[in-house]
Amino acid sequence: MAFRQGVRQGMGPPAAPAPTADMAPMADMARASAGPGGTGPVGTGPVEMGPVGTGPVGTGPTRRRRTDARGGGAGLPTFIPALALLLLLAGGGTPGLAGPGAASPAAARQQPDAAFPAFPGAVGFGAAATGGRGGRVLRVTTLADAGPGSLRWALEEETGPRIVVFDVGGVITLAREIRIGARATLAGQTAPGAGVTVRGARLVIVGDDVIVRGMRLRPGDGPGQDPAARDAISVGRSDGPVRRVMIDGNSLTWATDENAAIWYDVAEVTFSRNIIAEALADEARGFVSKGLLVGDGARAISIVGNLFAHNRHRNPAVKAATGVEVVNNLVYDFGPNGTEIPAGVTLPTTVHILGNVYIPGPDSVARAPVRLGSDGPGFGYYLAGNLDAAPATSPATSPATS
């Protein structure tokens, strides 16, 4: 089956689930971007790009930092924050996505606080996450891995609605992952000085209604968690559902597995305005540099207005997940694989890839940065308004992916 920019041949509008309470952002995007003539979850008209990709970001970077293994600590090369800032100044890269007050009446009935977004300007499926609203304020007063006043104490040991703020800044080195339970807001932007960096292990969100903002999560390849499971952040648990998560405005870098992952029975999640970059590459130790993976039954996922840079794979990758929207991201130096649906996926996968900007870099391979490697019953893809992303390759010609 041939694929083209726009609607997949023979498919009509996107074959995503019909709009329901948990699909409100896609339904709102249809009304905003396609206009009265739009049909289906996102309509049939293209998404307007706005200023993204038309200004200084299109001129390319000044220099590249290597993505070989290292530990967490110092900042990214200067051009990466500059590209991120330009992307954010373009309005978060979210034309037509649901914003404050855009939740449908059905969604409001399901979630009592749905009329109040996670924060002003929150968008996507995770916009209704309540976090620790109305709960206690817990203060992180030490950079130690554990104990009273530690990040682990506030996120993992304490329960109930809680807003976690920082009285200290610096580097927190973890020996093992921190599992974040329900009703928590992690406000990294409150840390004094240069902020706070977490290294050594990942943060894992295992409860509903979690908000993470303003954190530098750089696990690195030093002492700590098993490198095979060392993401910067992941969402999901094997023994239960996770709903309503907002990951916004963080730096997610230097992971030995993916920089970020969404896995298991997870729904209503937004990744917005993050830097997802420089996943470590060291083939001798099994690090192959991966950005963000969405899969294994996840649904209603928004990946909006992020900067992906210097990840060789998964920018992002989607497999066995439905109702995923990849909207207005900037993807630079994407190696062999940009945005991909890997070959060999057999479970239903539906993805909307709209208004993204792809800029090749030193490690990019000369092939399409959007590749659709699997097809079959329950699969559906919709592409529109992407810059330098056409033509997407069909399953018949797609090389193997990671």
Image: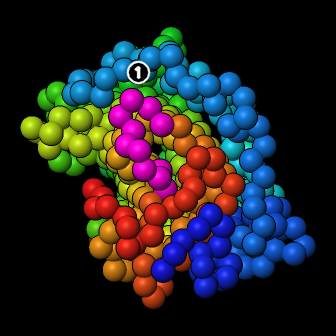
Location of residue 107 (image quadrant) = bottom right
In screen coordinates, is 226 left or right of 63? Answer: left
In this image, 265 relative to 50: left or right? Answer: left
User: Is 87 or 106 nearer to us in this picture?
Assistant: 87
Q: Quadrant of the C terminus?
A: bottom left
In the rendered image, residue 295, in percent from the top left (x then y), is placed at 38, 66
Identity of the residue drawn at 39% across and 34% down: 310
**Image: 137 above or below 265:** above
At 75% from the left and 57% from the top, the residue drawn is 47
For label 1, the residue is: 64
Residue depicted at x 38% and y 50%:
337
Q: How many marks?
A: 1
- 346 within the magenta span: no
| Secondary structure found at label 1 | loop
- The vertical placement of 291 against 9, above or below, is above
Going by the image, does 138 lie left or right of 374? right
Q: Magenta span covers which residues?
A: 360-370
